[in-house]
Amino acid sequence: MYFKEIVSHERQCGILSEAIDNGRLAHTYLFCGPDGVGKKLVAVRLAKVLNCMAENNGPCNTCGICRRIEEGIYPDVKILKPRGKDRIINVESVGELQRFANQKAYESKIKVIIIDDAHRMRPDASNKLLKTLEEPPAKTVLILITSRPDMLFATVISRCQAISFNLVPEAEIERYLMDVREVEAGEARVIASLSGGRISEAIKLLSDGLAEKRSGYINFMKSLLKGNAAAMFDIVKRLKEQFEEMEKNSVKMIMKSKKLDYGEFSGNAVDELEDEFKAEAMSMIQAEKEEMFGIWQLWFRDILITKECGAEVNIINKKDSGEIRLLSEKAEYSGIMDCICAIDNARKMLRYHADLSMVMEDLFITIMKNFKNREAVI
Ligand SMILES: [Zn+2]
C-alpha cells in the first residue's frame, strides 16, 4: 500500500513496508541495482511515507509535506548527489550532511537523508561518512543509492541493510505505459523494448517524442540500404553534424530546463555549474546514441523475425512491414545476424568515446555488404 504507484519491485517495497509496520526500520539502507529502475523513486517515496500528514496507509502526495518533499524543498529530507565536472561527492558535502543529521528536525517525525550515486564519494568522504554510520543519529534514516556497490568501501556496505533492485521486466513497463500513461499499445511495446528495463528511460523516451525520432533514425537506415557508397558517407556526415549540433546546444537546453541563468551566479560558481552541465550534456548525448542504436537493432530484429517466420507476425515496426519483408528477402539469415552484432559492437565502441565517423562507416559497410542487392557494395 505504501508503495502502490511504484512499478515492479514488489519484494523490495514489501521489505520496507514490513519494517515500517513493525517499527523496525534500519538506520541505513543501501539500495543497489541498475541505473534508472526506480531506486531513488522508492527512497523519496519512503521519505513521504514516514512524514506525510494524512492519516492513511501511504503518502497522499497532496499534503504540504509530500509536495515539498517532491520539490526537494522540505527541510528534513536531504538529497546529496555528485557535483562538478567529475561528478563526485566530496568530504565537505558529507560534513554538511553530518551537521544536518545531528541537528534537531525542523518539523518531521523522521529525517531522511538520501545519497544518490553513493559510489561517487571520494575516499575521504567515505571515511567521514563512516562515523555517521557507526553512531547513527536518532530518528534519521539514511539511504545510499548506487549502481556500483563494488566501488563502495566494504566498511560502508557492512553497516547498511542492502536491498537489491533489478531491471524492470519489459511487460511491466509496457503495462505501465498503457494503463497509467495511456500510451497506445504499439508505441508502448516499442518504448518498453528500447527502455532496456529502465523505467526512467521509458519515461524519457515518451517525453522526447519517440515516434518522430524513431522515424528519423529509421529513415537514415532506409536511405543507406537504398543508396551507394556516396550515400553512406553522406549519412555519416549528417549524423556527425546532428550530434555536434546537439553538443553545442545541450548545455543551453539543460540550463533552460533547470530555469537557470548564468547572470544569477558569479566567479567560480559559473565555472562549476558549466562543468557540471557539460558532464550532464555528454551523458544526454550518449543516451541519444544508445537510443539510435536501439531503434536500429529493433528494426533489424524485425527483419530477422520476418526472415525466419516468413510472415510479419510479432514485429515491432508494423508500419514498415512491407519494406521489412522485402529486405528480409535480400539478406541471408546469418547476414542479418551480423548486422545486429555490428550495431551492438558500434554501440560499445562509442561508449568508449571512439570516433563517431569511423565507427559509423564500419557499421554501415557491414550492413551494406550483407544486403545483396547493392550495386555499390564496398
Ligand atoms: Zn502527504
Image (cartoon, rainbow, N blue to C red):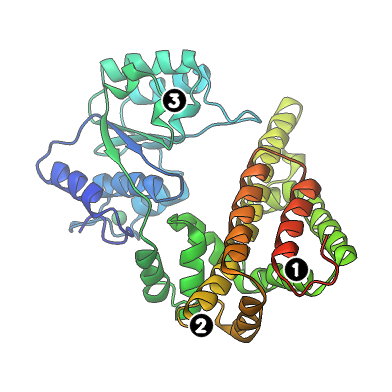
The residue sitting at the left extreme is: 22
Residue sitting at x 46%, y 65%:
192
Q: Nearer the viewer, residue 343 or 58?
A: 343
Q: Quadrant of residue 98?
A: top left
**Disc 1: CA contacts within 10 A as few (<14), some (14-19) or many (>=20):** some
Q: Is residue 33 above or below residue 65?
A: above
User: Which numbered disc, 2 or 3, marks the residue closer to the eye?
Assistant: 2
Q: Is label 2 in a helix, a strand or a loop?
A: loop
Query: Residue flagged by tag 3: what amino acid is it?
Result: Met
Mark 3 to mark 1: distance in Å? 40 Å
- Which residue carries the number 1 mark? 220
| In this rendering, position of residue 25 left or right of residue 300 | left
Residue sitting at x 87%, y 63%:
229
Mark 1 to mark 2: distance in Å? 25 Å
User: Which numbered disc, 1 or 2, marks the residue closer to the eye?
Assistant: 2
Query: Residue flagged by tag 2: what amino acid is it?
Result: Gly
Residue 377 visible to the viewer: yes
Query: Residue flagged by tag 1: what amino acid is it?
Result: Phe
Q: Quadrant of residue 57?
A: bottom left
Q: Is label 1 in a helix, a strand or a loop?
A: helix
Q: Nearer the viewer, residue 307 or 6?
A: 307
**Disc 3: CA contacts within 10 A as few (<14), some (14-19) or many (>=20):** few
* Residue 91 in the image, given as x and y percentages of width and height: 50, 17
